[in-house]
Amino acid sequence: MYTLVRRFIKTGIAFLFAGLGVGAWVLVQREIFGTFPHPHLVSAHTHAVQVGFILFLILGVALWLFPRAPKGDERYRPERAALAYWILVVATAARFASELARSASDAGWLRWTVVLSSIGQILGLAVYFWTMWPRIRPVGSHLREAKGERF
């Protein structure tokens, strides 16, 4: 497992624990103090666990397991995958932090931070899948399928 794959997976684990921390906090607020959690706290918790953990884990494992790009294909470059990682980690962390802050403030700049970080996540995913597209291909299975093998 090479560095970028480990980075995706370990970052996902960090987001998991950040999300679980917020989740524990809102659970205590609801169950012990009878205060229903602010929607932005719920969003921060859900976003950290679903996007931060699950998506980073999936992207890291896909980067590790998918077949190499065909020789001569210029679309897949490790530095593009690294760029996608950095865009995603910054955007996801900004989204998480700004959602947390939005639970305590209605400041206009925080609203814009939520929106722009969300767009950053979309951009990061677009770069990732543009980079990975040539690696999403059959390697031998299409030959077995042509012979009638069923999976």
Image: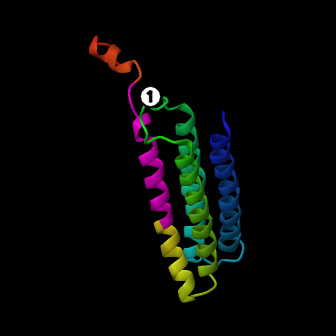
Across and down, in percent, residue 41 comes to 60, 72
Q: Nearer the viewer, residue 72 or 129?
A: 72
Reading the image, the residue beneath label 1 is 71
Across and down, in percent, residue 42 comes to 57, 69
Q: Residue at x 50, y 61 (%)?
A: 121
Q: Dividing the image into 4 quarters, which one contains the C terminus? A: top left
Across and down, in percent, residue 73 comes to 41, 35
Q: Nearer the viewer, residue 35 or 125?
A: 125
- Residue 135 appears in the rendering: yes
- Residue 54 appears in the rendering: no
Q: Is residue 42 above or below residue 127?
A: below
Q: Residues within 10 Å of mark 1 (few under 14, many from 20)?
A: few
- Labels in figure, total: 1
Across and down, in percent, residue 56 comes to 58, 49
Q: Nearer the viewer, residue 18 or 87?
A: 87
Q: Is residue 113 above or below residue 10?
A: below
Q: Dividing the image into 4 quarters, which one contains the N terminus? A: top right
Q: Magenta residues, as a range?
A: 120-138
Q: Residue at x 51, y 42 (%)?
A: 77
Q: Residue at x 34, y 14 (%)?
A: 144
Q: Looking at the rendering, which quadrant does residue 47 occupy?
A: bottom right
Q: Is residue 138 above or below residue 127?
A: above
Q: Amino acid at mark 1?
A: Lys
Q: Residue at x 54, y 45 (%)?
A: 59
Residue that protrudes farthest toward the bottom in the picture: 107
Chief secondary structure of the magenta portion: helix
**Residue 143 appears left or right of 6:** left
Q: Considering the numbered disc 1 on the image, is that residue within a helix, a strand or a loop?
A: loop
Q: Is residue 9 above or below residue 69?
A: below
